[in-house]
Image: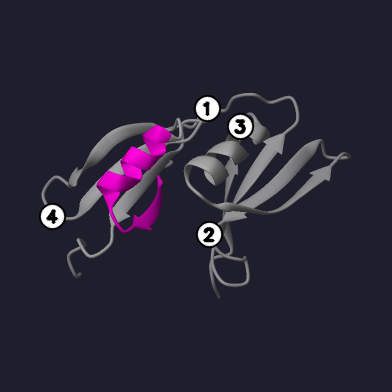
Amino acid sequence: MRILHTMLRVGNLDRSLDFYTQVLGMRELRRKDYPDGQFTLAFVGYQDEADGAVLELTYNWGTEKYDLGNAYGHIALEVDDAYAACDQVKARGGKVVREAGPMKHGSTVIAFVEDPDGYKIEFIQRGTQAAG
C-alpha cells in the first residue's frame, strides 16, 4: 500500500490552483469536471502521481467556503531553507502565519503558511529534524 493523495475542499478552484502552483511551486497534474455531480477535481504535486503522494483539490460548484473544524492539522513540506521559503511565499503574495524558526521544545526549524481556504502548510527545514 501507499498514500496516493490528500483531498482538500476548496471554495475557488482558480484561486487555489494559483496558490499551489504559483506560490508553492507545485504542478497541476490533471483536472476533470464532473457535470452530473457538479464538482471539479484538480490534482497538484511536485512529482507525478506514480512517483509520490499529491493533493486533490475538490471544488463543489457553488460552494465558496467550508468550515474547517478543529480536527484538521496541516500538510507538511520539506524545504531546503524555511527562512527563504517564507520570503518566497510572501514575495508571491502568500500568507505566512508562523515565521521560520526553531520549534518550541526542539531544534527543528519550521514555519507555517496558509492557503486561500485557511488550510495550514508546514515547512520543515531539511536536516534540522531530530532523529526519532
**Residue 109: % across, % down:** 21, 51
Q: Secondary structure at mark 3?
A: helix
Q: Give the Cα separation between the discs numbered 2 and 4.
A: 27 Å
Instruction: Residue at 40% x, 38% y: name it.
Output: 89
Give the amino acid type for the residue marked by disc 3 in the picture.
Arg
The residue lying furthest to the bottom in this view is 1
Quickly name the residue at label 3: 15
Query: Which image quadrant for residue 77?
Result: bottom left
Quickly name the residue at label 4: 107
Range drawn in magenta: 73-91
> What is the basis of the colouring in this image?
one colour
Is residue 66 or residue 25 the one in the foreground? 25
Q: Which mark lies nearer to you, 2 or 4?
A: 2
Quickly name the residue at label 1: 67
**Mark 3 closeness class: few <14, some 14–19, many ≥20 residues within 10 Å:** few
Quickly name the residue at label 2: 46
Residue 66 visible in the snapshot? yes
Q: Earlier in the sequence, mark 1 or mark 2?
A: 2
Q: Earlier in the sequence, mark 4 or mark 3?
A: 3
Give the amino acid type for the residue marked by disc 4 in the picture.
Ser
Residue 82 magenta: yes
